[in-house]
Amino acid sequence: MSVELKKEKFPAPSYTENVLADCFEDAKSFFLEALIDVDNAHAIMLAEQEIISDAELKMLLAAISKLDLDAIRAAKYDGSYEDLFFLLQREIKANCEDKEVAGKLHTARSRNDIDVTIYRLHLRKVALKLLNETMALRDVMLDLASQHHETLIPAYTHTQPAQPSTLAHFLLAIAENLGRDIRRLQSAFENMNYSPLGACAITTTGFPISRERTADLLGFSAPTVNSYASIASIDYFTELLGAVSALLVNVGKFAQEFLLMAMQEFDVIILSDGYVQGSSIMPQKRNPVAIEHVRAIASKGLGQALGVLTAVHNTPFGDINDSEDDIQPLVSSAVRDATRAVSLLANSLKAATFKTDTLRQRAEANFITVTELADTIVRREDLSFHVSHKIVGTAVKAALAVDKHELSPEIVQNAAREVLGRDLSMSSDEITAALSAENFVNIRTIYGGTAPEETRRALSVEKEKGSADQKWFEAKEQHLAAAASTLKAKIASVIDG
């Protein structure tokens, strides 16, 4: 039985409405400039390799330079061209005196290698912006830490008061996390910054092109190697999204901490008026909305990143639409939201103040200093920690039984007699000193500890890392700027003759 196929001219209305129109708008928003850079770099390379003539190069570069970018950005998809690439080819052809020369621009290339190249050109730019904002957030943490080496705070485990620490120790913990986030983003940038251009459809070309030259003109570190992998591999963005996801999980946890601090029940941080909102009905409210938005935007960005990773999971290892036009804007959006969340958190905290007196009082409350009393008893009395722990635990229970919320030397000695059958050799002053939050913090001088001398050392190390990261960032920006300048100068020199 024969089947009669319904003939419908491409693009079908539904395909236009649901695919091509949206992809066209996305391409204009994200990839227009990158596509033009690729056209220019490829044309220059073709001439240098004597695949086209110098006269043809001049005609092509002049035609590209005459593109009306504002008109292209304003254009609505009408189905007369398949996508932005073909619209540009049409406009370049219209700007060429010899229409056949326009077709030579597409020698030794494919939309496949063009697409994965422009995706990388765009992503490395937004990745650097996120890196810069993450470094700025770490700088805020380090600046705040430098002001609070002696500021006592309660540290929490399982959301319960646990042991005394310092605000510097807490902020340095955040900075250390951010340092690892920065290194992950740097690694993602480095691995992304290789040029697939010249891989063509998937197997390169028989023309004697120079992939090294186009990579250099576009500011890439080098060409990618295997042409199949150049087209098929998507880890240039999955690695970035992995780094972004780790960062956003961290940012969400940090935001939660500062939101708790801003609760009236905690009441230990005051955000600047520029980052709080009042209520339309409750006159007393100072809602910490900026930090709420940090958490919400970070969650949104993480959701998008995980959505992309889910969408590309188990897709074929080759040229496939699953990892191209429809998904690339979501990759960019995830990075953009990460940048927003990080920037907002940095600026909110830069203008915040801490209630140091309240923090200090809580560092002495809820028996959270007694671990050091137990440690001191071990050192002074030559007892096992098990026995010392029992003495101090007995003392705490005794204090609570008489509605006391701190230990006195008398209660401790009573507990010692109950457990040991004798008093401790420690004096009342020594017991009191062992229960001091300040002593608790200052005695922890070991590597990574809370003592101000150690947090000052740690701060110095983190600042050195920050300086190295800043140099790395500036080197990358300068390299990209130099490549863009070189490409622009080469175009001008050819056009001007």
Image: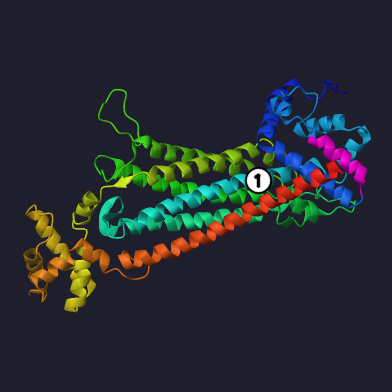
- Residue 79, relative to residue 114: is it above or below? above
Looking at the picture, tell me which residue is in the foreground, 38 or 321: 38
- Residue 157, relative to residue 333: is it above or below? below
Please state the horizontal and vertical placement of residue 128, each as a whole percent of the image: 59, 49
Quarter occupied by the C terminus:
top right
- Left or right, 333 with respect to 434, comes to right
- Left or right, 127 with respect to 68, comes to left
Q: Which residue is mark 1?
A: 314
- Left or right, 100 with respect to 32, comes to right
Does residue 206 belong to the magenta stretch?
no
Residue at image coords 45%, 41%: 344
Residue at image coords 40%, 62%: 459
Residue at image coords 71%, 43%: 118
Q: Assess disc 1: are there few (<14), some (14-19) or many (≥20) residues with their C-alpha within 10 Å of its C-alpha.
A: few
Task: Residue 103: name its quadrant.
Answer: top right
- Residue 63, relative to residue 478: is it above or below? above
- Left or right, 296 with respect to 421, comes to right
What residue range appears in magenta?
51-65
Please state the horizontal and vertical placement of residue 206, each as a whole percent of the image: 90, 52
Does residue 56 belong to the magenta stretch?
yes
**Viewer can see residue 320:** no
Q: Amino acid at mark 1?
A: Asn
Please state the horizontal and vertical placement of residue 231, each as a whole percent of the image: 75, 48
Q: Main secondary structure of the magenta part?
A: helix
Please state the horizontal and vertical placement of residue 193, each as a whole percent of the image: 67, 53
Secondary structure found at label 1: loop
Q: Residue furthest front?
A: 496
- Residue 352, relative to residue 79: is it above or below? below
**Viewer can see residue 116:** yes
Q: Residue furthest bottom?
A: 382
